[in-house]
Amino acid sequence: MISRVLVPMDGSEMSEQALEYALEVYPDAEITVLCVVGEPSSMWGAATGMALADDLGEVTAEHAQPTFDRARELAADAGRDADLETVAELGHPVRAIINRADDYDTVVVGSHGGTVADRLFIGNVAEKVVRRSPVPVVVVR
């Protein structure tokens, strides 16, 4: 029986569909939404400003908040907003997902992100999570 589900969300339509799937298919499971914010680097646009922040944890949470707000809307639509857990993490998405996966029965991930660049590398994160996850992974299209 699936009792704990990890759903990584990046704000894309596919990650929203992954959450909707998890809410529908695992109605009795504890669902955690994980939003991974990219590591600060001079090459990463908005993340560059994070490197100058006094509190990286606070800035990470601020960057993840719109994704969590949308996740709560989707959960409320499914009648499950009260039991949705959210976690913001700074780092590389694949590593962050894999590092947390052991604490869950399954990972439900969207097949690809929402940008044109993501579509050129269809399922790059999803593919790596499928290959490296210590638990079963459901890929939602």
Image (cartoon, rainbow, N blue to C red):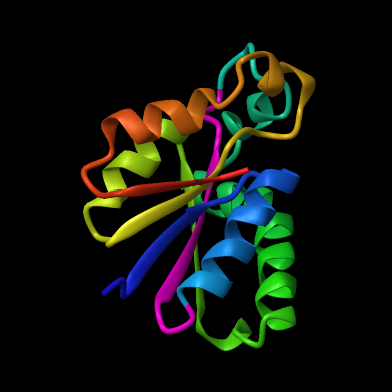
Quarter occupied by the N terminus: bottom left
Residue at horizontal 49%, vertical 81%? 27
In the image, residue 133 sits, relative to residue 118, either above or below, namely below
In the image, residue 15 lies at what x, y percent? 63, 48
Q: Is residue 141 above or below residue 21?
A: above
Residue at 64% from the left image edge and 65% from the top image edge? 20
Residue 11 x %, y %: 71, 47
Q: Is residue 4 left or right of residue 92?
A: left
Residue bounds of the magenta highlight: 27-40
- x, y percent for residue 6: 41, 58
- The foreground one among 49 and 128 is 128
* Residue 29: in magenta span: yes
Task: Please say whether residue 99 is one of the residues in the magenta stretch.
Answer: no
Quadrant location of residue 24? bottom right
Kindly tell me whether residue 96 is visible in this rendering: yes
Lateral position of residue 112 relative to residue 2, left or right: right
Q: Position of residue 34 (x, y in %)?
A: 49, 54
Between residue 89 and residue 58, name the one nearer to us. 89
